Structure formats: C-alpha cells, structure tokens
Amino acid sequence: MQPISGVHHITAIASDPQTNVDFYHNVLGQRLVKTTVNFDDPGTYHLYYGDETGSPGTIMTFFPWPHARRGVVGNGEIGAVAYAIGAGSVGYWRARLDQYDVHTGEVETRFGAEVITLRDPDGMALELVVDDTARTPRFWGGGPVPEEHALRGFFGVTLFESRAQPTGQLLTGQMGYQLVNREGDRWRYRADSSAGGGYVEVLERPGIGFGRMGAGSVHHVAFRARDDAEELAYQSAIRAAGFDVTPVRDRQYFHSIYWREPGGVLFEIATDPPGFTWDESVEALGTGLKLPPWLENRRSELQQVLPVLKV
C-alpha cells in the first residue's frame, strides 16, 4: 500500500449558492466543474470547483443551504483551507482581494513561507500560502486570473484539535504522512508525494470546546487513493487500527470511504477515477445539472426547486 499522496477534495457548507459561485468562480478564479445535488438532500446543490478538469488536489465543494446559520468553529474541525500560490503572486492577490472588498490580514510568515489570510462570504477561513514547488495540474484559461497568478491547487488544511498526538499517530501510521516541522502548538505533516495538497497542519488548542456546523464550516477533507484497490487497502488498514470505517460509497465522480479521526474531524478517502469528464466534455464542465441515475426521474421537480445560477 502506497502512502497517501495528498488531499483529493474538501467539502464545506455555504449559505447562498449564487454568492458562493460569485466568490469562488469570479474572485478566486476557480472553474465550476460540476453542478449536481446533495445525494442525501437533492433539493440542495452540490457545487464543485477546481482547475480546468477538476483535478484531484484542486477540488473545493459546497453544500449551499440558503437559510443555514453561521457555523461556530471549534476543536474537532478543519480550521482553515489553504491554497498554494507562487512567490510573485502575493501583491497580486492582496490587490485583487482588496478590489472585491475582501479583507486580508497582514501577510504572515509560517514555516518560512508567506501566508495571506482571508475569509469567504460565509466566514470560512482561507489561506494563500507561497509554495513555488506547487504547479497547477490543468490551468483553466477561461477564468479571470492570469496563469502566472492562478491558484495552484490546495496547499493543505489545518486541523483544530484538543490533543495533537493521536491525530499525528494516524497521519504518520496508517496514512503515511511525515512530520516535517513544528512551531509551538502547530505540527506540520507532509504527504510523501510531489502531488498538490500535500500538507496537513495540526493546531493543538487545549481547553477549547467543539464547534457547531453551519455556513462557513468545513464538513470534511478527502484524501487521494489512486484506484479502488488502493482504497480497499486503506480501508482494511484503518479498520485494523480500530477506526469505524464506512463501506465504499459511489459518489459518481469518485468512490469514497469515511471515518472520524481521533479528534473528531471527518476524514474521507476518495479515488482519483472516474473524475468529472465521464458525463460532460471538458468544454461543457459545470454547465448542466447532473443527476445520479436514481434521481433522474425527479429532474423536472428539482429544477423547479433549485435556484438558477449565473456563472
């Protein structure tokens, strides 16, 4: 079994779907690569953003519930989602975000790299981390951000934990991550791969309570498996370590297993295939409402319920 090569996708909760599209597509320059529904709540969109084809390591997804209360961030959650940018892009992004009235804090330095901090319209913490080794898998030329400044996929995630050690043991044990650095109460782990989204940071915050899911909360992080066989190997290894892992679930664009890490964050492993182009051409990605076979007979009903999105 190969070590995990990094983040596959990250899923969060939003409020207004149009506001979500306007920010991630128009401001951050991410392509809307798939418009589908929440399989467990089909009256709600499931929106996928990424590079030109939605390559693993670039995929940010949202369940937008228009009347959702704002979430409260606490331990047992993903506290920040980080994208990678080039060293020459800090000024560009600060100016661009200011143009769209997105507040950014002072540029920080963390583990020797510059970090821009900001929040999306629902208050979710985002970071733009300088990483000149990161490369955009498939740059999307139809977006508003030039290639030299485009987001280069995920840098990684920060987990908020009451105790760092149990989570670190899972990362370095069953998942194959390496502890590469520490600054105070922050531990940095790296996947043994050159793929994007390779970092997981664990921030230990003793005495802080659990949060409350809502708009602006990250629901889960998914890590990459190269194929079904590799996913099953991870499933066996994680179960053998005492975790309650779900059966494989077909998410149409990847196959998934889920479990909660020791601190309570929901982890997923998702397969790279089949990807987003099996039911839409590259040129048409995200332009049509895609439904799984068991919901196709409800298409007319759902189209009346789901708000029209302007992209």
Image: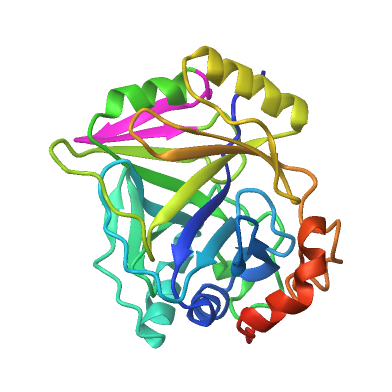
The image shows residue 33 at horizontal and vertical percentages of 70, 66
- Answer whether residue 176 is magenta in the image: yes
Say if residue 187 shows up in the picture.
yes
Residue 260, above or below 19: above
User: In what quadrant of the picture does the N terminus appear?
Assistant: top right
151 left or right of 285?
left
The question of residue 181 being in magenta is answered with: yes
Picture colour scheme = rainbow
Which quadrant would the C terminus be assigned to in this image? Answer: bottom right
**Would you say residue 152 is visible in this rendering?**
no
Give coordinates of residue 79: x percent, y percent: 33, 51
Where is residue 14? Give x, y as percent: 45, 68
4 and 124: which is toward the camera: 124
Dividing the picture into quadrants, the one containing residue 273 is: top right
Residue pushed farthest left?
207
Q: Position of residue 143 (x, y in %)?
A: 65, 77
Q: Residue at x 76, y 70 (%)?
A: 298
Corner quadrant of residue 49: bottom right
Task: Give the residue at x 40% y 87%.
Answer: 99
Q: Is residue 280 left or right of residue 45?
A: right
- Residue 235 position by quadrant: top right
Q: Is residue 286 left or right of residue 238?
A: right
Q: Which residues are magenta?
A: 174-190
- Which of 121/31 is in front? 121
Magenta part, dominant SS:
strand
Up the image or down, 206 lies above or below 238; here it is below
Q: Would you say 295 lies left or right of 267 here?
A: right
Q: Residue lying furthest top in this view?
A: 240
Vertical relation: 6 (above or below) 281:
above
Circle count: 0
